[in-house]
Structures are given as C-alpha cells and as structure tokens.
Amino acid sequence: MTPSDSTTTPVRPCVLLVDDIPANIGVVVDMLSCESIEVLIATGGEEALELIANHPPDLVLLDVRMPGHRRL
C-alpha cells in the first residue's frame, strides 16, 4: 500500500511527556489528547528510558529539573 491509499490506517503521532508535577502532566495531556496525539507519561528518567526502549515516541517533552538529577 502507498501512503496515499485510502485504506491505510492513519498513524497517531506519539509524544512522551516526562515530568514529576501532576498539574503539568494534566495540562499537557489535555492539550495533546484533543489533537488526537498519543501521550505516554513518565515521572522519572528511568521510566522514560524504559518507555522509549519499548515504544519510541516521535517527540519527547522533558522537564530537565526533576528530583534525582545530578548537576554536572
């Protein structure tokens, strides 16, 4: 099948959101869900890496200042 074939099922874009603040997660999920975007959620770095390994997203939205991070 070609991409222009009308029988092709559209693929929903996937965004991985990494944040430790529930209010931030809620706002982003609400915004992206109404745009028919699949949203994966991780609340920490290890969880994010696991999700990426199992279901690579198209985009990662990452809070860079979360507990447990180390300053270089």
Image: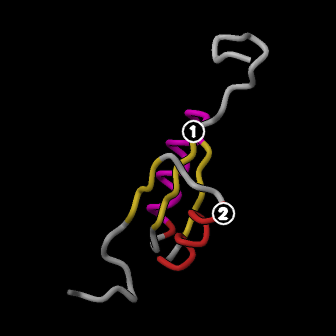
Q: How many marks?
A: 2
Q: How far is the residue under mark 2 from the one under mark 1?
A: 16 Å
- In the picture shown, does residue 54 fall above or below 21? above
Q: Which residue is mark 1?
A: 13
Give, as a three-letter code, the residue at label 2.
Asn
Give, as a three-letter code, the residue at label 1.
Pro
Q: Which residue is mark 2?
A: 54
| Residue occupying the point 37% across, 79% down | 66
Is residue 40 or residue 54 the one in the foreground?
54
Q: Confirm whether the magenta stretch covers residue 27.
A: yes
| Residue occupying the point 61% across, 34% down | 36
Side of 7 relative to 71 (left or right) = right
Residue that extends furthest to the front in the rendered view of this protein: 1
Side of 2 relative to 13 (left or right) = right
Q: Earlier in the sequence, mark 2 or mark 1?
A: 1
Task: Tell me which corner region of the image, top left, top right, bottom left or bottom right, holds residue 24.
Answer: bottom left
| Residue occupying the point 53% across, 71% down | 49
Magenta-tinted stretch: 23-37
Is residue 59 or residue 37 the one in the foreground?
59
